[in-house]
Image: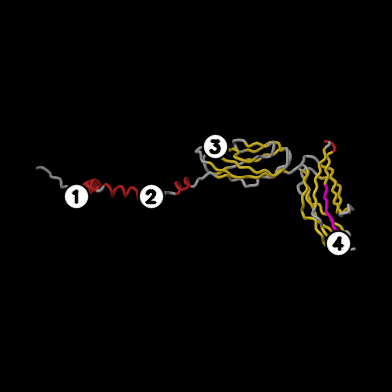
Amino acid sequence: MGCRMKPNRFVYGIATATLALIFWSSAHPGLLSVARAAAADAPQPPAARQQEDSGLTIINESPLPEAALGYYEVRLLARGGAAPFRWRLEKGALPSGLQLQPDGRIYGEVHSGGEFHFTVSVHDASNQHAQKDFTILVHSALELKWKTMAHVDGNRIDGSVEVTNATHDDMDLTFIVLAVAPNGRATAIGYQHFTLRRGTIEEELPFGDTIAHGTYVVYVDAVGEIARKNLIYREQLQTHPLDVTAGP
């Protein structure tokens, strides 16, 4: 006697739903495209957002470290982008004796003092690029600048300067400050003679003294000698006329 199997309603239900979806998609192709576009515009996972934000940036601060006469080296660094990075000088000038390598290293023997302004760029493997302006201050062999400008205080003239020895040798330094009247009469209001050690940066030298009633121009003179190399350096400062109204 034969055996008849009962139909499986669950299987028939899945098959019917699948056929219905196929027929509906064929009849409404435009709605299916809208659904796909909406899925593409949905928020992406964090990994995708990080990739979009990974811009190329130069991270060194400006100004770069100060330099003295002699050897100097600093490395430029970038963040973001894809290695390897290639660096180049876009405009301006590096201090005399320095050069920028494609790997971002600035190095060489500095020959002269001054403040140098320049722009560098960096390119990565995917041709992203960034650029930044930089400054390097190079100290001269002997530098002299005002710390406190010479000024009148009652019957005194006071002030101070900063002196720098940017060489690799100790200097025999003579420091003289004169207040000179219109008739040429000079009054010493400051004097020091000492060894200015190599690498000394902005050491303060104060000066001042009482002075007779009158008008004066203050002259500051610093002379540094490196005898074993037969080198002499000299720097000078001066003020506008100062009127001393107190005193005799």
Determine whether the residue tagged by mark 3 lies in a helix, strand or loop: loop
Q: Dot 2: what SS? A: loop
Q: Residues within 10 Å of mark 1 (few under 14, many from 20)?
A: few
Label of residue 9 in the image: 1
Q: Position of residue 9 (x, y in %)?
A: 19, 49
Residue 84 — which label? 3
Q: Nearer the viewer, mark 3 or mark 1?
A: 3
Q: Nearer the viewer, residue 169 or 146?
A: 146
User: Mark 1 or mark 4: which comes first in sequence?
Assistant: 1
Q: Main structural element of the magenta stretch: helix, strand or loop?
A: strand
Q: Earlier in the sequence, mark 4 or mark 3?
A: 3
Q: Is residue 13 above or below residue 82?
A: below
x 80%, y 49%: residue: 237
Residue 4, x across and y down, in percent: 13, 45
CA distance for labels 1 and 4 = 116 Å
- The x and y percentages for residue 132 are 59, 44
Neighbourhood count class around disc 2 (C-alpha, 10 Å): few under 14, some 14–19, many 20 upward? few
Given this view, does label 4 or label 3 mark the residue nearer the observer?
A: 4
- Identify the element where label 1 is drawn: helix
First along the sequence among labels 2 and 1: 1
Q: Which residue: 27% across, 47% down?
A: 29
Q: Is residue 92 visible?
A: yes
Percent position (x, y) of residue 240?
79, 54
Disc on res. 41: 2
Q: CA distance from mark 2 to mark 1?
A: 39 Å
Task: Residue type at mark 3: give it.
Answer: Pro
Q: CA distance from mark 2 to mark 3?
A: 33 Å
Nearest to N terminus: mark 3 or mark 1 = 1
Mark carried by residue 155 = 4
Q: Viewed as shown, does residue 15 lie left or right of 194?
A: left
Q: Does the CB distance between marks 2 and 3 fall below 8 Å?
A: no
